[in-house]
Image: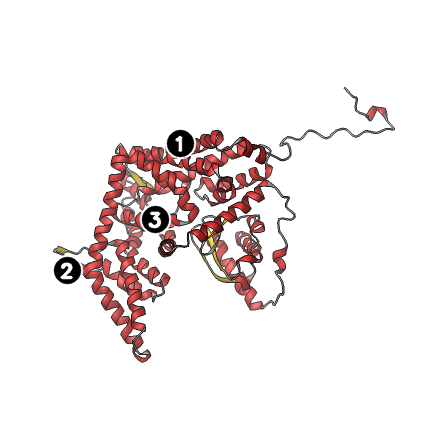
Amino acid sequence: MSTDKHRATAAAILPLVGGPDNIDSVTHCMTRLRIALRDRSLVRDEALRAVPGVLGTVEDDTYQIVLGPGTVARVTPEFEALVEEGRAAARATAGPGPADADPAGPRPAVTADELAAQGAAMKEARKERNATPFKLLLRRIANVFVPLIPALIGCGIIAGLNGLLANLGWLPSVVPALAAIASGFMSLIAVFVGHNTAKEFGGTPVIGGAVAAIIVFPGVAKLTVFGTELRPGQGGVLGALAAALLAVYVEKWCRTWVPEALDVLVTPTLTVLVSGLATLYGLMFLAGEASAAIGTFADGLLSTGGAFAGLVLGGLFLPLVMLGLHQALIPIHTTLIEQSGHTVLLPILAMAGAGQVGAAIAVYCRLPRNGSLRATIRSALPAGFLGIGEPLIYGVSLPLGRPFVTACVGGAAGGAFVGLFNQLGVSFGSTAIGPSGWALFPLLDGTSGLGTTVAIYAGGLLVGYLAGFAATYFFGFTQQMLADLDTGPDPTPPAPATPTDPADPAKTPALT
């Protein structure tokens, strides 16, 4: 039955993005179905957002449909299968066809639709303004790590469970097995990063993985570079990223001059040799220093100025999410997890979602007559509590303007709360990346015990909710905004009047 549901969702989406012939490629990350389109104009945004199960859309280098964790992994293969079936059938349609029909039926011209259109326009404008070489590079780096998130989450939760069992002294015979399961992926994550880097930047994926594997090979301990012995794993994911990127450029350079008859022998050999030597005698040391500096900076930042740092990080994270640049932080999170077993930054950044939720609830309360917008908020809030903020950002707060700013205020307050406890010596973080909001609870790990860690994180969420609500309720609207937005039928319409029957005076209501 579940498969039918996911196939129905995929079948509803496909005609609204232009049909099989308009699809170049299909991938997915943790929450979004990512589609490379041939003709963006064929997409029916309004109808797409009305499809049950669609939480929102995001315009970036690909067209991204927010479906939520778990759901997207099940809808994507169904969507891919429908695309292949459509192409195999070779339907030569002469028009947009099914895309003309809105599955939600006729929709009234209401404020929520207008806000959604404004949000879509803002996304498009921001995409154009942010298509700089530097930001495009950040997105490509993020693309290297996004496919790794499911494994990071699974191993992170197992690591947290293993730590709990070890602390309680339960099932001692199982603890070593769980430790091996949780640590196996992390011990070889450099190989996966190298593979994905080469794939993303146009090289041979397995060569990128082979060069990155040098970093985790135990034999590197026999080498001395810059007066110090190398350590297996030194440089971590940053070293793997740099090594594989270098391998891509070496490989492309080789293909410009190596004869085709010798390419299969010469190109991979030179690529691995040159990149490998550069990795051993330079990149591992430099990346190791950079990784150590990241860890030292993060610990020092929160231990000395935790409250202020949390305020800044929590307050600025929503704009990063809005621009899609938050995924560029994945290498930093992964580096911190490699070093200490958890990233102290993620719980603070998660407070931005709490501010967004509080702001949305305030909008709901301030606009009692706007039934359409309130319906949008009701449908998006469950995802918001789980840390998926795009539907609320693009469907509610960003088009309204001021509520987006007040949502950032809520995130800043929650971040300051969590940062303050880090400053007081209660340090904790997440053993994996990806989840946020309530979904982050199973991944929490800290130095002061699970109970204290959970209580502080829950307190930060509560502060974020309340601050976002208060800031939006009192400062999120001008009088003109309220006059323009708080329109629509009375939420409690009067009971229908008794019909008048001229033939029977007893059925005619008395005038009072």
Please give the name of the residue rendered at 25% of the width and 34% of the height, measured from the top-left corner: 425
Q: Residue furthest bottom?
A: 261
Q: As shown in the figure, which amino acid type bears the numbered disc 2?
A: Leu
Please give the name of the residue rendered at 21% of the width and 63% of the height, measured from the top-left corner: 278
SS label for mark 3: helix
Q: Identify the residue under disc 3.
A: 329
- Image quarter (top left, top right, bottom left or bottom right) of the C terminus: top right
Please give the name of the residue rendered at 17% of the width and 56% of the height, measured from the top-left corner: 230
Q: Tell me the distance, in whole angstroms, between the alpha carbons under discs 1 and 3.
A: 24 Å
- Identify the disc placed on residue 463: 1
Colouring method of the image: secondary structure
Residue nearest the observer in this picture, 405 or 491: 405
Q: Tell me the distance, in whole angstroms, between the alpha carbons under discs 2 and 1.
A: 51 Å
Q: Tell me the distance, in whole angstroms, between the alpha carbons under discs 3 and 2.
A: 31 Å
Q: Residue furthest right?
A: 503
Q: Residues within 10 Å of mark 3 (few under 14, many from 20)?
A: some
Residue 68 x/y as whole percent: 47, 48
Q: Of marks 2 and 1, which one's residue comes earlier in the chain?
A: 2
Q: Of marks 3 and 2, which one's residue comes earlier in the chain?
A: 2
> Toward which corner of the image does residue 233 lie, by quadrant?
bottom left
**Would you say residue 118 is visible in this rendering?**
yes
Q: Identify the residue under disc 2.
A: 223
